[in-house]
Image (cartoon, grey):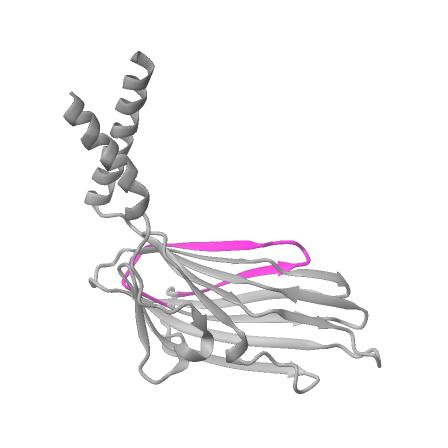
Amino acid sequence: MKTAFIILAAIVSAAPAVMASTTTCGNTTLDQYLTPNFTCISGNLMFSDFAYSPSGNPSGIEIPATSIHVTPLTNTLDEGFQFAGGWNVGTQPDGTTAIQDSVISFTVSTVDGKASLEDLSLYFNGSFSGTGLSSVTEQYCANGALATCGAGNSGQLKVANPPGSYMDATSFAGVTSISVSKDISVASGIGGTANISQVINTFSQIPEPSSYLLLGTGLLGCGLLRRRSSRS
């Protein structure tokens, strides 16, 4: 019984470690992702075809790729990225609107080629005052490129403040790849401010049966440990 107790304790203590995927994606600035033929992998997901297009009004306030920090998110079966760029504008002294706009695109696909991608989620923390507006609009295409996406495979997610909608998501029957292009925008209007400090994309996968088995084993171990503790 003591041996079984030790084994179960080891399983439970190891459980958090298996919940994080290994990644080759760098915790670095976006320009490092824009090098020719760049790809990186987190768990069973490969990320590729990164592109970036910034703009601003007045000229010179656009956010360069070197000022956007990319953090890979490695929760197993829910990998993705956090983009942090400090988008921040206020009405100009002459009363004209200030705008910063960043378009980030890439493709995510399963390493094993299985149609296990089932969910795409978009989050942000946009804020505003007065006439300001912060928003992220993301176009997506399942199993194809955005430029040639077939009918029924494309769609759009959007988060904005106002009206204070911070999360949007869509689900799929199971696909092998998703191409995305997110338009991150802040605009001051004629009398306000707008800010976004982070944008998060995650891509969920259908768990393999072995994942359920591992989770069940961990839960069983927790139950037995509690039961033994209550008896002692």
Residue 5 image offset from top left, x and y in percent: 21, 26
Most distant residue in the top direction: 231
Q: Nearer the viewer, residue 57 or 120?
A: 57
Q: Quadrant of the C terminus?
A: top left
Asked whether residue 158 is in view, the answer is yes
Tell me where the magenta segment starts and ends, as one range: 154-178
**Residue 14, horizontal then vertical, whole percent:** 27, 41
Q: Quadrant of residue 225?
A: top left
Please tell me whether residue 7 belongs to the stretch shown in magenta.
no
Residue appearing at x 37%, y 73% in the figure: 149
Q: Nearer the viewer, residue 45 or 7?
A: 7
Q: Nearer the viewer, residue 38 or 190?
A: 38
In the displayed structure, would residue 166 be above or below residue 133?
above
Look at the picture and state if 49 lies above or below 81: below
Q: Name the residue located 75 percent from the left edge and 77 percent from the top edge.
A: 97
Q: Main secondary structure of the magenta part?
A: strand
Residue 126 image offset from top left, x and y in percent: 63, 60
Of all residues, the one furthest to the right in this rendering is: 94
**Is residue 176 inside the magenta stretch?**
yes
Q: Is residue 204 visible?
A: no
- Judge from the rendering whether residue 51 lies leftward or rightward of residue 209; answer left or right: right
